[in-house]
Image (tube, rainbow, N blue to C red):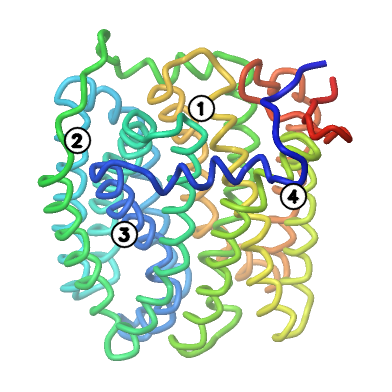
Amino acid sequence: MRSSKESPAGEDPFDEGASSVLRQPKAVWATAGASVVAFMGIGLVDPILPSIAKGLDASASQVSLLFTSYFLITALAMLVTGFVSSRIGGRKTLLAGLALVVVFAALSGTSGSVGELVGFRAGWGLGNALFVSTSLAVIVGSAVGGSAAAILLYESALGLGMACGPLLGALLGDASWRYPFFGTAALMAIGFVAITAFLKEQPKPARKTSLADPIKALGHGGLASAAASAFFYNYAFFTILAFTPFVLNMTPYKSGAVFFAWGVLLAVFSVLVAPRLQARFGSLRVLGGSLVLLAADLLVLGYGNHTAAVVGTIVSGACIGVNNTVFTELALGVSDAPRPVASAGYNFVRWFAAAAAPFLAPKIEEWTSIEMPFVVAAVAAVIGAGIVWARRSALTMEAEEHEPMHRTEDGITVFAN
């Protein structure tokens, strides 16, 4: 039996962790704020995908390449982020990533063809990879309250960004599909200024990261298992994000409202609900169960009517929020590799699925039926759950894994073996 710190009866053991998130240096808030905008860029195009297709005379499969090029370059760039940051420092890497996003987001708004837009999104993906991978390491290294509070803050930024991205896309995209790209460039420029002003240069690691280190890190069975499960999960996740807007076929405002509600659930469940579920049932049980529920939700999306599809899209945010939090903790804590290296290797694997799903989902629909992309995504989610179950011993973190906990009558929280 292992015991945690004593807690007065009736108090939530996560209240202290949640409150510590709010007591952070300005540098952490500047980085987290820019992270919000970075994650906004992922869902920004959701409400305007049909408008982009119409404006550039492109098909759904062509427009979906906006996600494919973005995440393919993001995945490949994960192998170089540690190499770069360990040589020029975290601050300069963040600023380089932000500068690239500002340039390519602005260029995306000037695109005259879908090919140009896909290319500019690829450049955007490079900047986003440099920024997002480094921002997590910077927040973990600078935040007050330890790694748990830092991850909570990072997931908060992710959830808020994923919620606000579709909303911004809808508000600006109702006038023109070009405006959301210009808006993102402006917000990222503000983030660039904030980080320049508030973030001091981070200490460089004693050992410089090589290009091969993230691949070598995947030799750890636990990290490789987490990455493999996350690969299939991300296929399901990005089928929802990239393909559902065409199925819903709504105006930018209505589609933006749906994905805003989706993002709110994602944020709430990642920050508030997931830690409590982990403490009660254990991380791996929560992750496996959430993946199975996501698979069921995908089947509702595929075979339900339009109202069911709207509800299913929104509800999927809850499962995705839980999964994101647990997967992030697994990636950072399951192996003995340095966190930036482990994160790079993990993200290198999982972002390939984010690149594949937006391309394959419309193709599968063209080849079969509108239901089949969701069936394939549901199968992917179940495979992800199967990997968690089959590799549960390798995925158990010695120091970080949350085990089920129970509260005794005297108010002392103990963990069951």
**What distance separates the C-alpha of mark 1 from that of mark 2?**
20 Å
Count of labels in the image: 4
Whether residue 261 is visible: yes
User: Which of the two discs, 1 and 2, labels the residue nearer the N terminus?
Assistant: 2
**What distance separates the C-alpha of mark 3 from that of mark 1?**
23 Å
Q: Secondary structure at mark 3?
A: helix
Give the residue type that dot 2 points to: Thr
Q: Nearer the viewer, residue 138 or 88?
A: 138
Residue identifier under label 3: 37
Contact check, label 4 and label 1, Cβ < 8 Å: no
Q: Is residue 129 above or below residue 211?
A: below
Place of residue 318 in the rendered image (x, y in percent of width and height, measured from the top left): 66, 60
Residue shown at the point (47%, 74%) measured from the top left: 60
Give the residue type that dot 3 points to: Val
Residue identifier under label 2: 93
Q: Quadrant of the N terminus?
A: top right
Residue shown at the point (40%, 60%) measured from the top left: 42
Give the residue type that dot 1 points to: Leu
Residues packed near mark 1 inside 10 Å, few (<14), some (14 to 19) or many (20 plus) = many
Residue identifier under label 4: 290
Residues packed near mark 2 inside 10 Å, few (<14), some (14 to 19) or many (20 plus) = many
User: Which of the two discs, 3 and 4, labels the residue nearer the N terminus?
Assistant: 3
Contact check, label 3 and label 4, Cβ < 8 Å: no
Contact check, label 1 and label 2, Cβ < 8 Å: no
Residue 411 location, quadrant: top right
**What distance separates the C-alpha of mark 4 from that of mark 2?**
34 Å
Q: Which mark is residue 332?
A: 1
Residue 28 location, quadrant: top left
Place of residue 319 in the rendered image (x, y in percent of width and height, measured from the top left): 68, 56
Q: Is residue 63 above or below residue 255?
A: above
